[in-house]
Image (spheres, rainbow, N blue to C red):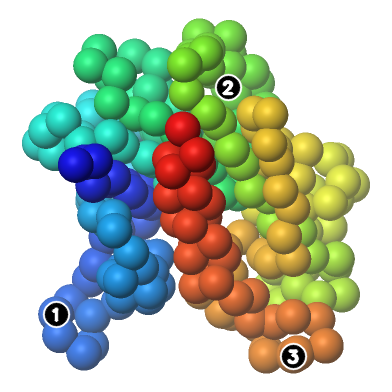
Amino acid sequence: MRKRLALVFVHGLLGFDRLGRGPLSIEYFRGVRACLADLPVDCHFPRLRAWSRVEARARLLAEYLDALGSQPCYLIAHSRGGLDARYVAARKDPRRRIRQVITIGTPHRGTPLADWFLRHGGALVRPLVEELTTAACQQFNREIPDREDIGYVSYAGRRPLAEMPLWYRPWTRLIERAAGENDAQVPVSSACWGKNCHVVRADHLELVGWQLGRANPAIERPFDHLGFFRRIAEDILNDVDEV
């Protein structure tokens, strides 16, 4: 009998697993737990330190995975969480239980937004953004190579400036001038990683179900994030069945 797969959802900077209890609780990956409840997978939502550096967050993630035992693991990571996932896969998985790293809106090559905040944001902002600058991510990519025995799949979000909520537009414009299409935080060119990159019509927070703009079916807002995560999970299951 085949072991159940562990889908491990890794949150991004300042993220969380679930806050509160009962009907008033909120989830970082909004509604995903319930959306996938009928599939033959075990979904896990570790809470990492929101403010910590990648190495510290990766250590916590590795400890979480160790507690899962021998289950095959698939890491599904949003934003900065994708760097944590890549770090764990490269350096903290001696038993080779990680089968795939799926990143969503991750700044693999950094983001001009972090570059700008590093220059203008002051000392309080520096710890949050310095690992997400283009220079820091270039160094990360040299030091943390991809493993040849697992698959890397990436998803990038993008919306044109006119579709962004007003408070996103200065960020969108800044990134667009430096690196082209983006999701208001990460350029498409940075979010694409691995052999398979998919681009979807969503801003950075829409990717995990946080809708900060006015609904408008004409521009596919809100983004169908539950259908998106459902397809990711079903693709994983189909790939396993084909092996």
Task: Please identify the residue farthest to the top as the structure is shown.
Answer: 143
Q: Label 1: few (<14), some or many (≥20) within 10 Å? A: few
| Residue 11: percent from left, percent from top | 38, 51
Q: Residue at x 43, y 50 (%)?
A: 237
Q: Residue at x 85, y 67 (%)?
A: 161
Separation (CA) of disc 1 from disc 3: 31 Å
Instruction: Judge left or right: residue 47 versus residue 212.
Output: left
Mark 1–mark 2 contact, CB under 8 Å? no
Mark 3–mark 2 contact, CB under 8 Å? no
Q: Label 2: few (<14), some or many (≥20) within 10 Å? A: some
Separation (CA) of disc 1 from disc 2: 38 Å
Residue to which mark 2 is pinned: 136
Q: Label 3: few (<14), some or many (≥20) within 10 Å? A: few
The picture quadrant where one finds residue 62 is top left
Position of residue 161 relative to residue 97, above or below, is below
| Residue 36: percent from left, percent from top | 36, 68
Residue to which mark 1 is pinned: 21
The picture quadrant where one finds residue 18 is bottom left
In this view, the residue in front, 34 or 207, is: 34
Q: Residue at x 77, y 38 (%)?
A: 189
Dot 1 amino acid type: Arg
Mark in front: 1 vs 2: 1
Dot 2 amino acid type: Ala
| Residue 131: percent from left, percent from top | 51, 29
Residue to which mark 3 is pinned: 216
Q: Is mark 2 on a helix, strand or loop?
A: helix
Dot 1 or dot 3, earlier in sequence: 1
Dot 3 or dot 2, earlier in sequence: 2
Separation (CA) of disc 3 from disc 2: 37 Å
Instruction: Judge left or right: residue 184 versus residue 73.
Output: right
